[in-house]
Image: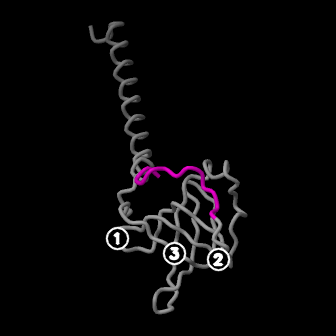
Amino acid sequence: MGNSPATGVFQQMKARLLQVLCMTVFLLAIASPVLAHHGGAAYDNSTLTTLTGTVTDFQFIQPHPLIFLDVKDASGNIEKWYVEMTAPNHLVHFGWNGHKLHPGDVIQVKGNAAKNGNKVLNLRKIYDADGKEIPLGPPPPPGQN
């Protein structure tokens, strides 16, 4: 009875179920950092922070392009900020690419600062040196990066 056809089918089904379960656990494990990333809990969405500074670097990368900005504080000291933008696949529809900003450009940004005090801003609006808004497209609601 141990080698009946039914036992062989049962063993194959158990092996297949184990494979599917392992694959599901693996996929959930690698997806969890991505799922955890999206959300605005790390930012103070109740306050809009405005910064004016000089671009030191611009990285048009996934999952969010980054603007590195030197900003003078009230005492004239330079603070290094980085500004996180919305997804590049959204921004390209509004003229953005890796050459939109350059080191030395003076810009103003508005967004939500990190709650933990780090010099990180989740971008909502951006303006050139003349005060002209640079389109980002319709921004996602706070907390929906």
Q: Are marks 1 and 2 in contact (CB under 8 Å)?
A: no
**What type is the residue that disc 1 sits on?**
Asn
Which residue occupies the extreme right position in the image?
Answer: 99
**What type is the residue that disc 3 sits on?**
Leu
Residue nearest the observer in this picture, 12 or 132: 132
Give the CA distance from mark 3 to mark 1: 18 Å
In the image, residue 34 above or below residue 74: above
Among the two numbered marks 2 and 3 on one chain, the one whose residue lies closer to the N terminus: 3
Chain part drawn in magenta = 133-145
Q: Name the mark on residue 106.
A: 2
**What type is the residue that disc 2 sits on?**
Val
Residue nearest the observer in this picture, 28 or 108: 108
Residue at disc 1, secondary structure: loop
Give the CA distance from mark 2 to mark 3: 11 Å
Examine the structure image and report whether residue 137 is included in the region drawn in magenta. Answer: yes
Left or right relative to 119: residue 4 = left
Residue name at image x 58 percent, y 78 percent: 53
Q: Are marks 2 and 3 in contact (CB under 8 Å)?
A: no
In the rendered image, which residue does mark 3 sit on? Answer: 51
- Across and down, in percent, residue 48 comes to 43, 66
In the rendered image, which residue does mark 1 sit on? Answer: 116
- Across and down, in percent, residue 11 comes to 34, 18
Among the two numbered marks 3 and 1 on one chain, the one whose residue lies closer to the N terminus: 3
Residue name at image x 62 percent, y 73 percent: 107
Asked which quadrant contains residue 64, the reply is: bottom right
Examine the structure image and report whether residue 69 is included in the region drawn in magenta. Answer: no
Asked which quadrant contains residue 102, the reply is: bottom right
Badge 3: few (under 14), some or many (20 or more) residues near its Cα, within 10 Å?
Answer: some
Residue at disc 3, secondary structure: strand
